[in-house]
Image (tube, coloured by chain):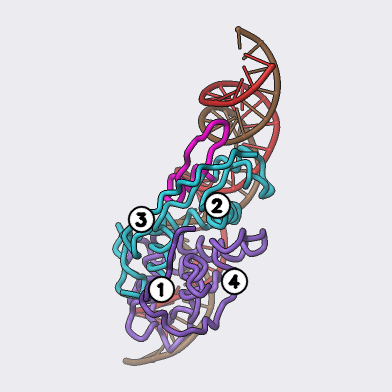
Chain colours: A cyan, B purple, C red, D brown
Amino acid sequence: MPTSRAAELPVLDQPDEGVAPCCPPLTERPLDAEEAERAAKMFKALGDPVRLRLFSLVASHEGGEACVCDISDVGVSQPTVSHHLKKLKDAGLLSSERRGTWVYYRVEPGVLAAMGQVLTAAGR
Amino acid sequence: MPTSRAAELPVLDQPDEGVAPCCPPLTERPLDAEEAERAAKMFKALGDPVRLRLFSLVASHEGGEACVCDISDVGVSQPTVSHHLKKLKDAGLLSSERRGTWVYYRVEPGVLAAMGQVLTAAGR
DNA sequence: ATGCTGATTCGACGGATGTCAATATTGAGG
DNA sequence: CCTCAATATTGACATCCGTCGAATCAGCAT
């Protein structure tokens, strides 16, 4: 089991917004090719059941981060888990940090809100 | 979890969500295999740049619907456009209706809000 | 009917993707 | 140093996916 993490979580929650201005809400105006390319990359990353579960496991984990060892039980081999985590990281949805033997993944702050705003033109 | 959430953020539209209970917010608890399968299907549908543009074209079009002829200019051949529209339809994101010579696609009501809620745990 | 236009379907092709076993890397401990 | 446990990388394989041209279907008109 992972060692207990120091109680020094970065409290950087700005009021709201702030991160990843990938593109306007889908309902506001047609996305151009470039915007679509960027946004589609994120949606694509969540477009695989295993990746979506892994992401959800991290996102719902205490402290907003999770050790790989805590989330590896999704029905595929360990290399496959690693592969998917890498993809989520490449898509900008997760970040990783090695602490001793274990590697911790956390949800990149803001991306959830950013993607949510692309779908629902709530505030704007 | 350091979020305060006390502030008066942009008032959400209606208190009732209503449609498409695909699965809980990703941050609430880990998705099980079945939920992930369902939700991933939608994200996957938006995970292609051309599809995302087509969807955005429909979603942002006047009246919430658009004729295929109005949105076919996204840089791929017309059969490919048709193929992508079919995929969006199969994923439950669009519906189509033929009116005379033309076929109109419209955003299936509620799906945007539903997907948005999966990303941002608004209701909570 | 014949033709025309808008849209879907078919068949094929190349490239991307998910998966695994095997191997390599990294750090902790003896 | 050596060994072990946790992750990552490699290489191979089968399948899926986006794309196109050609053919087909569906209305509307002459």
User: Mark 4 to mark 3: distance in Å?
Assistant: 25 Å
Dot 2 alpha-carbon crowd within 10 angstroms: few under 14, some 14 to 19, many 20 or more: many
Query: Where B109 sits versus C18, above or below?
Result: below
Please give the chain letter of the residue carrying mark 4: B
Secondary structure under the numbered disc 3 in the rendered image: helix
Q: Position of residue B36 (x, y in %)?
A: 61, 61
Placement of the N terminus of chain A among the 4 image quadrants: top right
Residue at mark 1: A120
Secondary structure under the numbered disc 2 in the rendered image: helix
Question: Quadrant of the rendered structure where residue B99 is?
Answer: bottom left
Residue at mark 3: A38
Dot 3 alpha-carbon crowd within 10 angstroms: few under 14, some 14 to 19, many 20 or more: some
Between discs 1 and 3, the one toward the N terminus = 3
Dot 1 alpha-carbon crowd within 10 angstroms: few under 14, some 14 to 19, many 20 or more: many
Q: Tell whether label 2 touches label 3 (CB within 8 Å).
A: no
Magenta stretch holds residue A86: yes
